Amino acid sequence: MNWLGLHVVDWLVLLLYLLGSTWVGHALAGKQSSIRDFFLAGRALPWPAVGASVIATELSGVTFIGVPAMIFAAQGNLTYLQWAIGSIIGRLLVAWFFVPRFYEEEIYSPYDYMARKLGRPVKTLATVLFFMGAILGQSVRVLVAAIPLNVVTRLPIEWCIVIIGAFALLWTLMGGMRTVIWTDVVQFCVFLFGGVLALVWICLSVPGGWAGVWETAREFGRTDLWDTRLFVDGKLMAHLEFTLWVALIAVPFQNLSVFGVDQMNAQRMFCCHGVREARLALIFSCAGQVVTVLMLCVGLALFVYYHHHPMGPEQAEVLFPLSAEEAAAGVSPEVKMIQAGFVAGSNVPLVSNRDYIFPMWIVQVLPAGLTGLLLAAIFAAAISSLDSVLGALSQTSLSLIYHPERLSGEELARLNLVQKARWLVAGWCVVLVGFTLLMNIFREGIPILPLAFGMTAYAVGPLLGIMLCALLLRGGQLTWLGLTVGTILSILLVLFIRTDVWVLLQAAGMDIKLLAALPTYDWNPNQERLVARFSSAWAWPVTTLMTLGSSFLFSRIPFKLIG
């Protein structure tokens, strides 16, 4: 028996997962009598749990859906895995150089450390940057989790976004970081089991099993791993994202910022007993790259599955849903499929709406019960990221307003900051859900994985630049001004090498063709859109050095020349 497009058994599995995770969070919440308990879990959590929580937060629904979808992109392959090299390098650097600084005094975030080294104005600047990066990046993760719920139930995607936000809010309010981390452990296990289940099921559904999957994928060039290209036909290929050079040079900067400065991940380091345990947790989180390998293998298997089971009208209805105008005009999903360059019954790689591939396979192929389990894995990935960022946004907001690290125990008790923290969690949940609803209006035709990385590019470099300044410099009279100038220049640079903002403005009716005259863009006349000449991954090191360099410059200018 089906209800809202899903078998009753699947709904029961989903319900059991949500109730079970909620029970775990409630049972392990512990006391929440102070903000030290609420935000730092009393600094008493075991490092394996913290490491698993880091992995769960990092992966999110973007990995579960976006990574397999990459294989369906034109010329999709395994080159994304090269980024694992830079990711591991970045984490090791954070573990050895950043983490000890976090335990020098009783602080709650990297921004508190910045305040002590460079002054309160710098803390404010860094916190605002974190707000911007968190809202831009995490809204993508909420959106990607809403896709399978929309595919399965046919509920409006707006409702799906609100449902996900509601559960993340519940778990965060229940017990602060202790609940967040322990529910993340559960979600990590569900996520891992779901990926393994999908891979095994597909391999049993195609000729030759895994060996057959690999051989067929290899024939189509999908197993290519190394991309060392820098120049092609004498031209610099700076727009390529998944190359060895990006992995070795740019990605470590991103991971230094994500794990050492971004409060969503750094907050977990503060929940350990001490430096040694925090280091072990971060090193253990490198194992998350194994899950990335798993989901890339799922993508290969899906590509081969649809090679042997060509798509038809049933898949067209999911991948190319009709608008009200198209339905009234008599357009069919099959016609839209053909117009997109994908002929029903053929093996042409899908480009449009490829982020729906894995959710579609889950609901159309798996039997009742297993479908619910895989959907639970997607929710596990999504909610683990959202509840984490809600806690981080609440903590940084509270710190910006009250500076609890500077208050005595009596002052903290009198302010009742735990209650205020819960109100801030609820407020930020409304903001994130609202921004996700706004992003959904304009996201059509933009792949999820590049969008998730790109939206954070505005904040990654400046945040890392400020942190490096705190490590290398003493607070000077003009250091904050130099960092502010460097941050503004960095954001402008990213704005004019990415196309996200301009795509939104174009969707709103603005003519953006004149921007093609800039050296950072080309114009695609067939698709009527801007094309970036440079990968925004290079913005991570460039904007980091730009922000840091600006602080050095201004800290050495005599005050009289400016004042």
Image: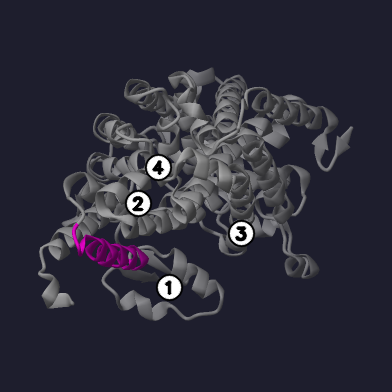
State the CA–CA distance, disc 1 to disc 3: 25 Å
- For discs 3 and 4, the disc positioned in front in the rendered view: 4
481 magenta-colored: yes
Q: Nearer the viewer, residue 540 or 25?
A: 25
Q: Which residue in the structure is indicated by mark 1?
A: 525
State the CA–CA distance, disc 2 to disc 1: 32 Å
- Upstream in sequence: badge 4 or badge 2: 4
Q: Which secondary structure lies at badge 2?
A: helix
Disc 1 crowd rating (10 Å Cα; few below 14, some 14-19, many 20+) is: few
Of the numbered discs in the image, which one, if any, rests on residue 109? 4
Of the numbered discs in the image, which one, if any, rests on residue 460? 2
- For discs 1 and 4, the disc positioned in front in the rendered view: 4
Of the numbered discs in the image, which one, if any, rests on residue 440? 3
Q: Which residues are magenta?
A: 476-496
Amino acid at pointer 1:
Pro
Amino acid at pointer 3:
Asn
Q: Residue at x 58, y 20 (%)?
A: 200
Q: Position of residue 217 (x, y in %)?
A: 45, 31
Amino acid at pointer 2:
Val
Residue contact at pointers 4 and 2, CB within 8 angstroms: no
Magenta stretch, main secondary structure, is: helix
Of the numbered discs in the image, which one, if any, rests on residue 130? none
